[in-house]
Image (cartoon, grey):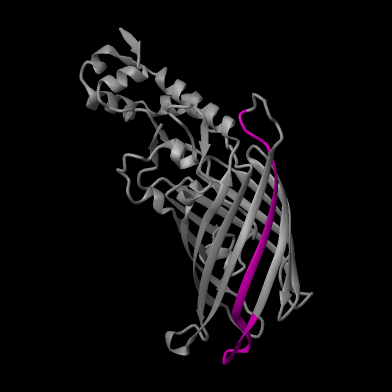
Amino acid sequence: MRTKLALSIVCAFGLTLQAQQVDLSEFTLANASTPAFVLVEETPTAIYTPENLKALAIHALDNFGKSLSVEATPYFLINQERKDRTYQKYIGVTQDEETKKLKQNPFSGLNTTTISFAYVDKEFSGLADERKTYSIGVRTTLLRFYNKEKVHANTIGMATALSNITVPVEVLTQGPEAIQAYYNDNQEEINALLEPYQKVIKPQFRLDAAIGYSTLFKENSISSGTVKRFGSWLTSETSIILNEGSDAKTNNYFNLLLTARYIEDGFNTTSPEDFFTNYYRDFGGKLEFEFGKLGVGYEYISRKGTIDSERSVGNIRFTINKDISITGGFGKDFSVNEDDNLVTLFGIHWGINTGNSKVKL
């Protein structure tokens, strides 16, 4: 005989909804680059706001072996046993137990803070060979605002789907450990039930901040001395859903992104002995359409400072599965030489479910 595992039964066994968990790693990776890559200007897209739901993400460019970046999300790697790790708190939309009113924490995006590392074999004007550059970056979401009702309805849908899982009576009578083991053994069935509620729900507005530091050895040797590049920037995103109320398997969006950056660039040279620093202020924007697995966009950045320049690039992104996506960028990159500023870059992005990415529902 089989019976439905309702929330009350779970509570009765003292699980306090432990069995009812959402694995955030089952959501699609939406991370098109890293601050460490953006700072050294080796990336298909320079304007993006990721929702990184993986503990680790690896980013590689088309010159495999010469450009690699690793991004880690501390939220999934530390404090994994905290009792207050819930999906509602992660998203930032909770319901008051007494008034039943929905509340929003605009600072919940701090959970998505990432640290990234990168190395790039980069070509420089004035040098005969490439230079290895190393960089580190930190990114976080300062503010984000969701449609509270939409997020809450999605949460209720997930809870209902989980409560409808059927569990054999003989398992129920064996206690909490047996129930948890049953859930673990039937993870594929559970993920299938949750799939309709794992569509991307983007914030209506969000504001990201990033900072990066990069260095290179002047003559590719430790004894040759180093020069640096430093940058900090803000990126905002406003998202409008295009298929509201549709039964489609994905949500389609139009996104408007704006960015402002400050850069101190010491990677300028006329010879291996003569490096100098330029200072820039960048302002730009991006228009992007997301249609399920496919995303297309166009970004433009105007650079003012020691030398004026601009970046004008079309972007394309395709999601292969929840863990792997590819991106491409085509257009004109920053350069003082108009005959040498074409950019064609491809990137592959792989999310790794290391650590504990499960949160209570």
Count of labels shown?
A: 0
Membership of 255 in magenta stretch:
yes
Residue 54 located left or right of residue 206: left
Instruction: Find residue 149 and report its image quarter.
Output: top right
Q: Position of residue 358 (x, y in %)?
A: 38, 38
Q: Work out which residue is located at the far bottom of the displayed protein and give it.
A: 273
Q: Name the residue nearer the viewer: 217 or 229.
A: 229
Q: Position of residue 225 (x, y in %)?
A: 47, 87
Q: Quadrant of the N terminus?
A: top left
Q: Position of residue 162 (x, y in %)?
A: 42, 23
Q: Quadrant of the C terminus?
A: top left
Q: Name the residue nearer the viewer: 115 or 275.
A: 115
Q: Position of residue 212 (x, y in %)?
A: 53, 68
Q: Work out which residue is located at the far right of the displayed protein and give it.
A: 338
Residue 71 located left or right of residue 147: left
Residue at image location 67% in from the left, 25% down from the top: 245
Q: Where are the magenta residues, as a range?
A: 249-278
Residue 134 located left or right of residue 76: right
**What secondary structure predominates along the stretch shown in magenta?**
strand
